[in-house]
Amino acid sequence: MRSLASIAVLVLAVGLLPLFVSSGVTLGFVTMVLYATLLGQAWNILGGFGGQFSFGHAVFFGTGAYAMAVLQMRFGLNAWAALPCAIALGGVAGTLLGALSFRYGLRGSYFALVTLAFAEVFRILANTFDFTGAGVGLQLPLQEGAAQLQFATETGYLYLALALATVSLLFAWWLKHSRYGAWLAAVRDNEDSAAALGVNAFRVKLVAITVSGALMAAGGAFYVQKFHYIDPHLAYGAPISVEALLSAIIGGMGTVFGPLLGAVVLHGLGELTRNSLSSTPGASLVIYGALLVLIIMFMPRGIAGLFEGKR
Amino acid sequence: MTQRRQFLMNTAALAATAALPLGARAQGAPAIKVGVLHPVTGALAYSGNLSRLGAQIALDEINAAGGIKSMGGVKLAALLGDAQSKPEVGVAEVEKMNEQGASAIVGSYASAICLATTQAAAKYNIPHVVDVGVADQIVTRGLKNTFRFGPGYKITTEAAINNLHIMNTVARKPAKTVMIIHEESLFGTGTANLLASQLPGMGYEVKEIVKHANPTRDFNNIVLKMKSINPDIVIPANYYNEYALLLRTMKQQNVTPKAVFSVLGGAASSFKFVKEFADAANGVIDVNHWYNPKDKRAQALRKKVEAMPGQFYTYEVFLNYQCMYLLADAIERAKSSKREDIINALASSTWDKHFMPYGPTKFVNGQNTGAAPLTLQVLKGDIKVILPNTFAETEPVFPWKV
Amino acid sequence: MKSDEKAYPPPAMLDPAILFASVLNGLTTGAVYALIALGLTLIYGVLHIINFAHGAALMMALYGVYFLHEKLGLDPYVSLPIMVPAMFVAGYALYRGVIARASHGKDENILLITLGLSIMLENAALYFFKSDTLTIDTAYTLSTVNIFGAMIAVPKMVAFFGALATTAVLLLVIGKTSLGRAIRACAKERQGARLVGINVDHVFAMSFGIGLACLGAAACFLLPAYYVNPQVGNGFVLIAFTIVVLGGMGSFVGALIGGFLIGVVESVGGLLLGESLGQIGIFVIFIIVLLFRPQGLFGARA
């Protein structure tokens, strides 16, 4: 229950933030942290709670992003209607990819590599078909207004990101406290003995990857609404997969708040190094990389590991 | 006597202080902050750093020449930003610049980043001078803060098609077939689409359109295809690395079309390429951002840049250099560091003290309507303007004789 | 050919001379891929880690070759005996000094460490060497060899034989030396190896060093036909992974043949489907192999 209270406090605190803070930098920072939390949590549900490492979560992100843009631009759907469709399509992509790879028993780095390959295939496909704008990408028309899910100020995006991130946190909390979550943990720790206890490992993993894909697609949909532009590299490129797994692993895998902590630290570090070393290109990212290595060196269980004591 | 003299001297000193030239007094006034936003790390780092260089040279020159004179010589101060080759980082940098009190922003090179940063700047009504960003969507969205000094890819491609046709007609039409080779993102695909839709109407057969990834590690395949198609004209639209590899491979495979005619070619209007691959570059024609070759200021800047170790005089440099001057002129006329005033001054800009072949600036929907590319050819190890005639330094060599 | 396609122009891909040249070109390109994949497959086979810093290490090696050429006037092929040991030492030190210390034996940590390292290296290169794309000009850069009408660039021919030689040397080292026996033992059963008195950490570091040494060789063969900039490695990482999986993780012969195969698929696929879409062939093969034969074409079942 303590985590549930913490989530409530977080929602309240962030929800009230725009009343006290008007700085676009601060609100933008919080928005991007929440967005990164969403991506990290999406990865965490499959990778942290489920033990299935993915290097290609961009495949779901891109599907959500393209669905959002295509449904609005080619089918004239309202953004509010397109959002659940995009999320659902991300879930479907998760189910399909999961069914294929889990059916053939891919685990560990084999699973990681197959997700990577799928992201690449989708990137090339998005690059090829006019339907997705091919290499030109899709430019979402500028129509500011809550009815279009586009906002003139940062506050609107802040609330959208908060809503999505909260859903992801609540799902992670549920995983910690539900029977399904226990099955998933059993599969992560030892798939064979979980199966021996009567857990349907295939189905358990399939649910995890479906939810994971749906949440990641929500991130993609958010990206399109906020930045109004998507192209194959932004949607399906490796950087987005890396962003998702970084905040989850740095923050602490298989924990409810790990992705949030990871997102705060990574974005904080990113801002700090970028602001202090803006006149020497490269220097800021060298330090960013070095800090990353140091964090892993000294916090092998992620930042959340510091709070949890010995497991 | 001594008292009187002392008194006189004191009065003189006081008077001198009161009569201090405006410039000196303004040193106390806060500088006008200008965001200089480019992708200086990540995949676009090369172009981003050159862009930053151009903007900084201009800014230093403006300050050295006495700053904004209409405001008593107040100086410009750069707020350097790094978009890390990602649109969302570009947006975060705009937010930061807004809070640091930027009066205007110059940047942010790549089309995808410009789309994001112009819009973020629009939220705060920050004037945003677009340095390169050739995608035409940047200036067709009705953003009042956005001003693009240079030409978009539509203007550039149309100029390219016209000039190709002129050259071919003058040479009694030796060229009939075309092969287009383009990179897969916004710039290459957009350019290729325009070419493919317009060339057939002018009597050219587009034999093949090849799209390739960034990076493409090997061009032998594409050149093999070229060999079998044997097009009269090869039109590349891609970035520097791929462009260079393509031309090297054509040289190796001994493929010599009647012309290599590129649009916004990554390398054909690059002194670096001409210097490093003199053989492969020879004869290549390119339609690109270029300065008026007869303008002494353009040549002076070239000398200045080439005197810096390892730097080359590229379109990124001189476009950003000019964009900074364009902005300074607007601030000069606005007599204000207020964003709204600068936007109005930019919108009514008729600036003609630049060395680009554009004529006085005139912005319609944020696009400088006079902006146009020049057609260039690599001849004897140098880059020469061949078309249009007003700016031409020499006659085109077309078809290219081996 | 589909019947509804236009009868003209004559489809270029059916020209046997072009197809032959494309296959040869694929083989020589594949040789360079194989060289990069050789190091990766050793690291993967022994340490079971996905080395995300492989591309960044290749980039550093390419800069090494570049500066040896620019500052000392050394031909890239002459640089081989310098670059191979230098990269070996760098790899050994990197493993012992950073990776082993920071990983705490967890695979996901090694993944992040190598990711962090690659960010550091790439941007250190940006900081020190600037973002310029650098190339070297040698007498043979633009020379070609005519093989039954197909023009193959000399540097690519050299790379082809270089890949064969490197594979042979690796097979000898792993198959015939005591170090090789230790490496094989650690790859198979690290606890068992430790029990029989093998210094596992040392062997791991040696493997990592040899893996990077392969990159030193790859860089010497690659630079004359290519270029170097801070991002250059990224373009090779994914393809190297594909080859490693295809050939079977840990198999040198697999990496060599996988490299050739991927090179040819990329080349001929590009010819038939177009350059951009042709890349799909690689990843479709990748996925099929992962699903149906995850041990790869030449690997033993893990």
Image (cartoon, coloured by chain):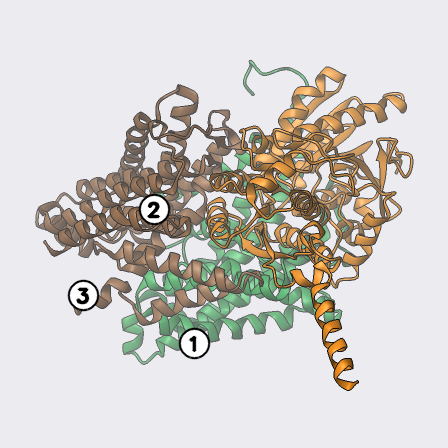
Chain colours: A brown, B orange, C green
Q: Amino acid at mark 1?
A: Gly
Mark 2 residue element: helix
- Which residue occupies the foreground of this view, C274 or C168? C274
Image: C11 above or below A231: above
Q: CA distance from mark 1 to mark 2?
A: 35 Å
Q: Are marks 1 and 3 on the same chain?
A: no
- Which residue occupies the foreground of this view, C237 or C23? C237
Mark 3 residue element: helix
Q: Which residue is mark 2?
A: A35
**Other residues around mark 1 within 10 Å, as few (<14) / some (14–19) / many (≥20):** few
Q: Amino acid at mark 3?
A: Glu
Q: Name the side, left or right, on which A269 lies relative to C22.
A: left
Q: From this viewpoint, is residue B230 visible?
A: no
Q: Amino acid at mark 2?
A: Tyr
Q: CA distance from mark 3 to mark 2?
A: 25 Å
Q: Which residue is mark 1?
A: C97
Mark 1 residue element: helix
Q: Name the side, left or right, on which B32 lies relative to B11.
A: left
Q: Name the side, left or right, on which A123 lies relative to A308.
A: right
Image: C118 above or below B161: below
